[in-house]
Image: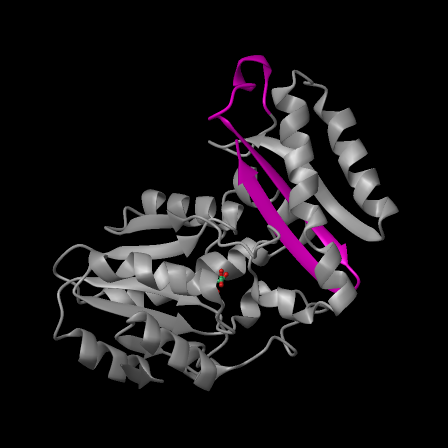
Amino acid sequence: MQVVHTIAELRQILAQFDAPAFVPTMGNLHDGHLALIRHAKPLGDVTVASIFVNRLQFLPHEDFDSYPRTLQADCAKLEAAGCNVVFAPSEKELYPEPQTFKVHAPAALGDMLEGHFRPGFFTGVSTVVMKLFQIVFSQAKGPRHAVFGQKDYQQLMVIRQLVRQFAMPITVHGVATERAADGLALSSRNGYLSETERAEAVQLSLALKGLIAAVLGGEHNLAALEQHAAQTLAARGWQPDYLTVRRRDDLQPPQGADFQPGQLVALGAARLGATRLIDNLEF
Ligand code: PAF
């Protein structure tokens, strides 16, 4: 496996291949990321992972500075998973001048849920992903594949729309969320949790399961259900941002005929102590 830090080095390597399969990450890798690599491997003739903690997608009070940078350990895991090339640029390499050209997600998708609670998040994600796609895929002659986790459900939708609306010849893949034995979605931020918080953390996915069970049981008063779910978590010491049921297609609240399995997804974000966790479950 080759590890490179500049765009020029990466392009030199990729010139020898036709069809990169690309997994963008921010590092501090866990089994969820490695599942993305395993998914990517058969898709192309070279598997590329990027590791870059993207300042543009963090709000000033968020964990950009403390986000764990674990390049050596990440590279060992990527190599064991069969990755061929790691692109780990410095900030100066990726943003040599202020990144004043930005890609804004459409408000109807990007300003709700995560975008509401983390304003600017999807602009930061869309901008870096657009840039990484330019860097990784510009010389490809064959199929181009990019692989993302479904844990960031709304992010995956934003990226699919980005690729569609800019007519980029890239196939975007979403890979199912990897979970710990108790059901907690794997996340780089789980490492921030204390032992007690870690034991509590599964309650977020249980709250989503509770929402799903209520909807499947015939309850369609979503406002009441969502409020109850949020209050239940709050009573356990969480600070919920949202717990909600949405249409899978566009993340809008479901109307009458939408209330069917196969159409809906439950999504949640809540803070446990200092750690903000997100999760989702399709149903
Ligand atoms: O999901 C992530 O890790 C990041 O948002 C991404 C897609 C690598 C962009 O920085």
Identity of the residue drawn at 68% across and 70% down:
192
In the picture shown, does residue 7 fall above or below 187?
Answer: below
Is 235 displayed left or right of 160 in the figure?
right
Is 84 displayed left or right of 242 in the figure?
left
Instruction: Determine the image quadrant of residue 254.
Output: top right
- Examine the rendering and report whether any part of residue 101 can be seen: no
9 in the magenta segment: no
Q: Position of residue 259 (x, y in %)?
A: 56, 19
Identity of the residue drawn at 33% across and 70% down:
81
Is 278 displayed left or right of 170 in the figure?
right
Q: Position of residue 32 (x, y in %)?
A: 46, 60
Task: From the viewer's side, name the closer residue of 48 and 102.
Answer: 48
- Examine the rendering and report whether any part of residue 173 can be seen: yes
Q: Position of residue 69 (x, y in %)?
A: 54, 81
| Residue at the outermost front position | 181
Task: From the viewer's side, name the closer residue of 75 and 108.
Answer: 75
In the picture shown, does residue 193 fall above or below 108?
Answer: below
Is 194 displayed left or right of 149 in the figure?
right
In the picture shown, does residue 167 fall above or below 39?
Answer: above
For the image, the number of numbered tags is: 0
The span picked out in magenta is 254-283
276 in the magenta segment: yes
Identity of the residue drawn at 74% across and 68% down:
195
